[in-house]
Structures are given as structure tokens and as C-alpha cells.
Amino acid sequence: MTEQPPPLIPPMPEAPPLIPPAPAGPPAPKDRRVLRAVLRWTAAVVVFAVVGAGTAYGITRLERTDVPGLATESDGRWEYPTLTKPPLPSGSPGPLDGTNTAGTHHADLRALLLPAPRGAEEDRALRGKDGWLATGDFLAEYPDKEERAELRQRLVDSGLRHVAARGWTTQDGTHTRVYLLHFGTAAVVDDMVGALASYNAPNHTVRGAEAFTLDEDFAEAPQPDGTTRLAYVEAAPSGAEQVRQAYVSAGDVLAVIVQSRKGTAHAVPFRQTVMLQTQLLG
């Protein structure tokens, strides 16, 4: 048999030439309304996104206590006025400057006293005469007559120049006394610190307390270079009130700080007071 040839497949017809679409005319009125609505919503979303981002940035830049609802409770610190060191005479170094080997405070000692915190009642008896307190008024902090007489003689032998003092009572009944004792050199102050206090306890008791122990937590806190700080808290059981005291040396000045309160003398305001007074002297 003769093989039959395969049937011929007719070629595909050529596609008609592409005809460009006619240009679109203006949208119908309904289309315009839809377009305007979409644009309005888009603009609103952009505005809210910008405002939201700005608010978030603002909150990250605020302190926690500035944001409503995020304020933290007070930790017991007092509100002191803005502290400013008095200007030094032209060309005079600071007390802790390396070139000031005697540790001399060239500023007026009375201007270096820590001010009373806001709302406190100042103890006028500690103002003294012209801002200088009599040595006997300072020694009244020490109730034992023999210790007081010994300390008085030591102050005379060490060349005590002046005593500047300030005291106040806050609304919670905490009574604070700050004494700045001015001597001739930093070396003399170092000797006085050793006479008044040891590492574990002060060498002399102050009024209102019998025994003290080292404030160990405060001992670990930082302090300005060139200063010495020994702080104590009345040992338990305390009497009707508890007493805290500290001795701070900074150059030719010895600061004696005593704080007492019925019940418990809180640690936070005491340490805050000591640290701020130390910074003013440094």
C-alpha cells in the first residue's frame, strides 16, 4: 500500500495589528468623588503617622517624671536650691588643686555652707555673730564634759580659725546641723579627723546618742577625689530619736554634720546632705 502523506495543517492567521487605545476622557463625576475621598484618607494617614512619630520622639526625650502616669515616687531626697560655688579670687587655685599644697580655701567659708532645703525652718541659733559661730556652741554637740574639754584644747592647739554653721528642721522633724571648721592647712585637718573619728566609730559621742556604727552602705558611695568621709549611724537600740553623724575633710576645712529625728533618722536625706556639702567644699 502506498503511505498517505500527513494532512496539511493550515497556518495560523496573522494577528491583527495592535490598535492603540483611545485616550481616556475625563472621569465621570462619580469617579472624581471617589478619587477625592481616597486622597483625603491618604493625607489623613500621613498626618497621623507624622504626629504619632513626633509624639513618640517627644516622650523619649522627656524625663520619666515629666510624662503623666509615669512619675516615680520620691525616694526621700530633699529639694535643695540650686547650688553655686562662690567665685575664687583671681589667680587663686581651688582647695583640691594639685598646686594648692596647703589645701587652702580662698573663698569665704560662710558662702560654702550648704543652704537649707526648701520648706525647712532654719535654726537661727547656729547663725552666730556675723556668720561665725562661737567654738563653745559647736562643742555643745558633745555632752560629756571631759570629752568636751579635751576637744576644746585640741582645737586650740590645732589653730582653729573659724566655725561657720547652719542648721534646720524639715517638716518630718529631722534636725540637721552642719559645722565647717577652718584650720591652717590640710595636714592639720587630717590630724583632727584622726582624733575625732576612727573607721568603725567616732571617738566622741554627740548629744542624743550613746553608740555608733559605721554607715557601711554609705562608705561604698563615691566621693570627690582629695576628700575624706567617715559617716556613722546610731547603733540599735536607739532612744526616742536616732542620730547620724559624719566627718568630712576637704583641704583646710573639716565638716561635721549631725542629723537626728524622732524614731528613725532616714539614710537618704542624710547621705544627700553630706554629699552636697562635700561637693561645695571640693
Image (cartoon, rainbow, N blue to C red):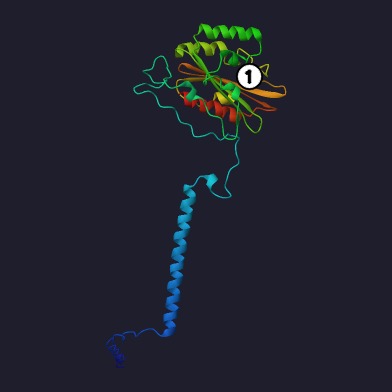
Res 15 quadrant in image: bottom left
Q: Is residue 121 left or right of residue 182?
A: right
Asked whether 96 or 151 is in front, the reply is: 151
- Residue 111: where, in percent of width, then height? 48, 25
Asked whether 271 or 130 is in front, the reply is: 130
Q: Is residue 221 visible?
A: no
- The residue at the far front in this view is 130
Residue occupying image coordinates x 48% and y 58%: 52
- Residue 91: where, in percent of width, then height? 34, 22
Q: Is residue 50 visible?
A: yes
- Residue 51: where, in percent of width, then height? 46, 59
Q: Which residue is mark 1?
A: 213
Q: Is residue 69 above or below residue 194?
A: below
**Quadrant, the C terminus:** top left
Residue occupying image coordinates x 38% and y 17%: 100
Number of numbered tags placed on the structure image:
1
Q: How many other residues sit within 10 Å of disc 1, few (<14), some (14-19) or many (≥20)? A: some
Q: Is residue 122 above or below residue 39?
A: above
Question: Type of residue at label 1?
Answer: Thr
Secondary structure at badge 1 equals strand
Residue occupying image coordinates x 44% and y 64%: 46
- Residue 21: where, in percent of width, then height? 31, 85
**Quadrant, the N terminus:** bottom left
